[in-house]
Amino acid sequence: MKIISASRIIHMVNKTHRELPAPGSIKAHILVAAKAEFAQYGFEGARMQRVADRAALPKPNIHYHFKSKQQLYLAVLERIIESWNLAFDQVSEASDPAEALEAFIRQKLRQAQQDPAASRLFANEMIQGAPNLKHYLNTSMRAWVQDRAKVIKQWMQAGKIQNVDPERLIFLIWSATQHYADFQVQALSLLNRAEFDDPVLTETADFLVTFILRGCGLAPDSRTT
């Protein structure tokens, strides 16, 4: 397997960030404010007026784009999930599995560092049994996982990676990266580190990339960046 340079990985990760919805749009601005509100107060405690206050917009503007608190909450969660999966959205049978998986892992870990509240908000919804997200999980998210699993199966059939459980490989990447958002205090305390800074991010990403790629039969004995 060819070694992937650090600059190549940074380019791939940055490319996915550029493909996110335009951050300057009013709708995107509302979603940012709403994410902060839901992360602090949960679905039940969140208030549309406070979302409007956070966004510095009149409350009717919020209701123009989102008719109800639940619709806004779902939009926040769906955008979180879609942003997590961007790095793996466009991979195909022709993609290099090592590059695709490494970019996915590094992007997810970068998001855990930069926006831990998003992961905690999603985790809280899951812990409660996904009362608001169940339909999305059973439709859009399931379809995405099945489609991406199909690509991984094509890689296996082509002999590009060894046989693995495609769905559980995706679950592993999700859980291994989101751990550093959901349990950041625990991880930093046990690692004796003060904050989840770039050195911790790099060390963690290198470990996860090597460990997961080796499990797919992709990683050499040593890696250089």
Image (spheres, rainbow, N blue to C red):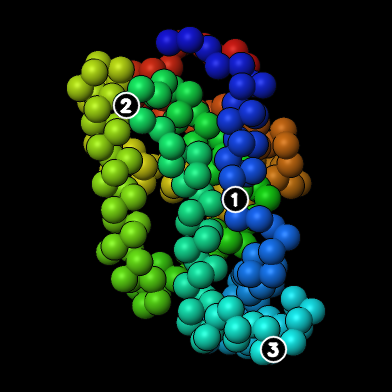
Front in this rendered view, residue 196 or 31 = 31
Who comes first in sequence, dot 3 or dot 1? Answer: 1
Which residue position holds label 2?
93
Q: Are marks 2 and 1 in contact (CB under 8 Å)?
A: no
Q: Residues within 10 Å of mark 2 (few under 14, many from 20)?
A: some
**Does the image show residue 141?**
yes
Asked which secondary structure carries label 1, the reply is loop
Amino acid type for the residue under numbered disc 2: Glu
Amino acid type for the residue under numbered disc 1: Leu
Compared to 211, does 72 lie above or below? Answer: below
Who comes first in sequence, dot 2 or dot 1? Answer: 1
Compared to 157, does 164 lie above or below? Answer: below
In the rendered view of the protein, which quadrant contains the N terminus?
top left
Residue 185, percent from left and from top: 64, 55
Q: State the mark number for residue 20.
A: 1
Which residue position holds label 3?
59
Asked which secondary structure carries label 2, the reply is loop
In the rendered view of the protein, which quadrant contains the C terminus?
top right
